[in-house]
Image: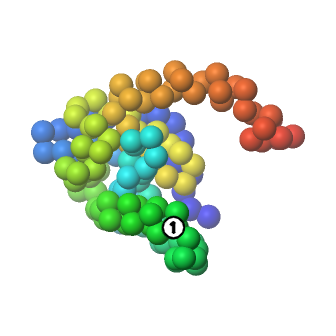
């Protein structure tokens, strides 16, 4: 099983579109990662091994299913493989920065097997809208566990 990503971090993009990865995850991501479009206008950051696992899962999905084709096209066409520099920074390509509305203040959240990068204001808006739903859904999503 790969790394588990947790927590909320608030790095800033520099003028060159670079972002410092949270220090606690730099070692796990030092060999490389893949950034791609995520849902709700955030970016997904996967360790290479996790991205390969998803690639394998999608390759077994039926290409006759339009939803699989549509998802795969956007997911892979927007993907960018990156290797952090010695300071733990990654460059986020311009197209991905535009998609997620990233300009300066960002939020990097741990989302189990991936990190997500959000514009800080977009994250605050999303979180405020979801916190009550989170409380309401615990029994439905994790029955008998929590």
Q: Nearer the viewer, residue 36 or 6?
A: 36
Residue 95 position, x and y percent, is 23, 51
Q: Quadrant of the C terminus?
A: top right
Classify residue 35 as left or right of residue 110. left
Give the quarter of the figure containing the N terminus: bottom right
Residue farthest along the right direction in this orientation: 144
Q: How many marks?
A: 1
Q: Is residue 121 visible?
A: yes
Q: Secondary structure at mark 1?
A: helix
Q: Specify the quadrant of the image occupied by residue 30.
A: bottom left
Q: Which residue is mark 1?
A: 66
Q: How is the image coloured?
A: rainbow
Residue 84 as seen in the image, left or right of residue 114: left
Residues packed near mark 1 inside 10 Å, few (<14), some (14 to 19) or many (20 plus)? few
Most extreme residue toward the left, as rendered? 15
**Which quadrant holds residue 27?**
bottom left
In this rendering, is residue 89 above or below 78?
above
Q: Is residue 33 visible?
A: no
The front one of 13 and 89 is: 13
Picture quarter containing residue 28?
bottom left
Q: Residue 116, image x and y in percent? A: 43, 45
The residue drawn where x is 49% and y is 52% is 114
The residue positioned 28% from the left and 50% from the top of the image is 96
- Residue 44: x and y, percent? 42, 51
Determine the residue positioned at 19% across, 50% down: 94
Where residue 134 appears, x then y in whole percent?
66, 29
Residue at (57, 27) in percent of width and height: 130
């Amino acid at each position: 099983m790969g790394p588990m990503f947790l927590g909320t971090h608030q790095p800033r993009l520099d003028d060159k579109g670079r972002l410092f990865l949270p220090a606690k995850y730099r070692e796990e991501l030092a060999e490389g990662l893949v950034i791609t479009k995520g849902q709700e206008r955030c970016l997904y950051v996967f360790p290479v091994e996790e991205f390969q696992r998803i690639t394998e899962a999608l390759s077994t999905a039926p290409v006759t299913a339009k939803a699989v084709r549509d998802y795969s096209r956007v997911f892979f066409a927007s993907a960018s493989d990156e290797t952090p520099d010695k300071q733990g920074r990654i460059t986020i390509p311009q197209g991905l920065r535009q998609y997620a509305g990233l300009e300066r203040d960002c939020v990097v959240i741990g989302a189990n097997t991936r990190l997500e990068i959000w514009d800080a204001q977009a994250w605050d808006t999303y979180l405020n809208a979801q916190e009550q739903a989170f409380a309401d859904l615990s029994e439905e999503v994790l029955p008998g566990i929590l």
